[in-house]
Amino acid sequence: MPVNLPAPSADALAHSAELCGVICRDISAQGGWIPFSRFMELALYAPGLGYYTAGARKFGESGDFITAPELSTLFGRTVARQLVEVMQASAPHILELGAGSGKLALDILGELEKRGELPDSYSILEVSADLRARQQALLQERLPHLAGRVRWLDALPEKFSGAVIGNEVLDALPVHLLYWSDGRILERGVACPADHFVWQDRQPGCQSLLDIAKNIKVPDDYLSEVSITARGLVASLCERMEKGAMIFIDYGFGMREYYHPQRARGTLMCHYRHHAHDDPFYLPGLQDITAHVDFTAVAEAAIDCGAHFLGYTSQAHFLINNGLTDLLGEVSPDEVKAYAPLSGQLQKLTSPAEMGELFKVIALGKGLDQPLAGFLRGDLSRLL
């Protein structure tokens, strides 16, 4: 058990124990071993029990972590400006993937209404019934007159034109763990002897995973992640997109930095009540499990499906390029009570010591010829 973490309640412990039982039974049914990707999938998305499908609060000060939309309305308002450009060049539709608390959708729609650029439809793909209910409640409370424009999807649409936005979505998709040792590539999975989880390495059973791993050049005794699920999601979006762009905002690196020799223990991280640690077996269902995004893999998956690379930059450059400072300028510095909090939020969104450089933004699309405003300065494509 990681040290110095807040103690969960008795009900929370019981909830986690129930999910552990589900995972152990799944391991047993699969012959005593599952890949870590399956463990992560169950820990996060098991119906009614997984971290994202159960009812515990996840976002904000009372949750486990704070996302940019929770931090400041400036984030969603600035993203909205980029979505306008995409919609004007394609179609007036927005698809948001994994909308969290609904705060990003709220801020985007509010800004678009203010600018007279409301989409004909705003679709949200959300796998969690609990989060979907929270999103619906927030939008109904804050923007009831726009409720008719928002719809929730259970699956990707067959065809889509317009703008796709995914903020901190790719990092929450299941990843495979791979271990390079003595010239061999092993997959690190999970076993469950005596009702507790242990690591166990085996030969990769998935040929596509092994093919990807063989093209990754790392030193011996090296552990890292590969997300086939992220590749699949991006490919599916590209296959369905007729005209438009998808924009992903997340923490991660290009492939060379992701698999840097000094990053020999990978990027897997867990978040519990604003504490970060690296033990995914600690209280499954009560903590988030994430891995950084390999943006090179994301770009390649899109290009292989006929999409075009439209840009890659830091969150700081993306937001500033889209007029973040202009939004702050709408408030007079003399209005200290209003200006000071917004100034502090802008600093957190753009500072290299906060979210500005760790978070990256990538855009991929079809049928768009002009460069997008968010990527006009601060190009980082050389790092992919």
Image: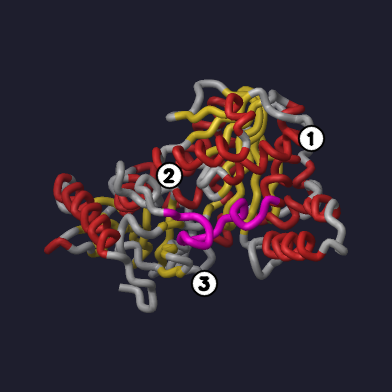
Q: Foreground residue, 383 or 82?
A: 82
The tag earlier along the polypeptide, 1 or 3, is: 1
Q: Is residue 17 visible?
A: yes
Q: What residue type is labelled 3?
A: Gln
Position of the N terminus by quadrant? bottom left
Position in image of residue 368 (x %, y %): 73, 29
Q: Can residue 33 be seen in this view?
A: no
Q: What residue type is labelled 1?
A: Arg
At 14% from the left and 50% from the top, the residue drawn is: 28
Residue bearing the label numbered 1: 115
Q: In the current view of this chain or complex, which residue is farthest to the left?
A: 194
Coloring applied to the structure: secondary structure
The tag earlier along the polypeptide, 2 or 1, is: 1
At 47% from the left and 29% from the top, the residue drawn is: 153
On screen, residue 109 above or below 241 = below
Residue 128, located in which quarter of the rendered image? top left
Camera-nearest label, 1 or 3: 1
Which labelled disc corresponds to residue 74?
A: none
In the picture, measured across the screen, residue 343 lies left or right of residue 99, that is: right
Marks 2 and 1, how far apart in space? 39 Å
In the picture, measured across the screen, residue 78 lies left or right of residue 282, that is: right
Camera-nearest label, 2 or 3: 2
At 51% from the left and 57% from the top, the residue drawn is: 292
On screen, residue 71 above or below 367 = below
Which labelled disc corresponds to residue 228?
A: 2
Label 1: state its secondary structure.
Answer: helix
The tag earlier along the polypeptide, 2 or 3, is: 2
Magenta range: 57-73
314 magenta-colored = no
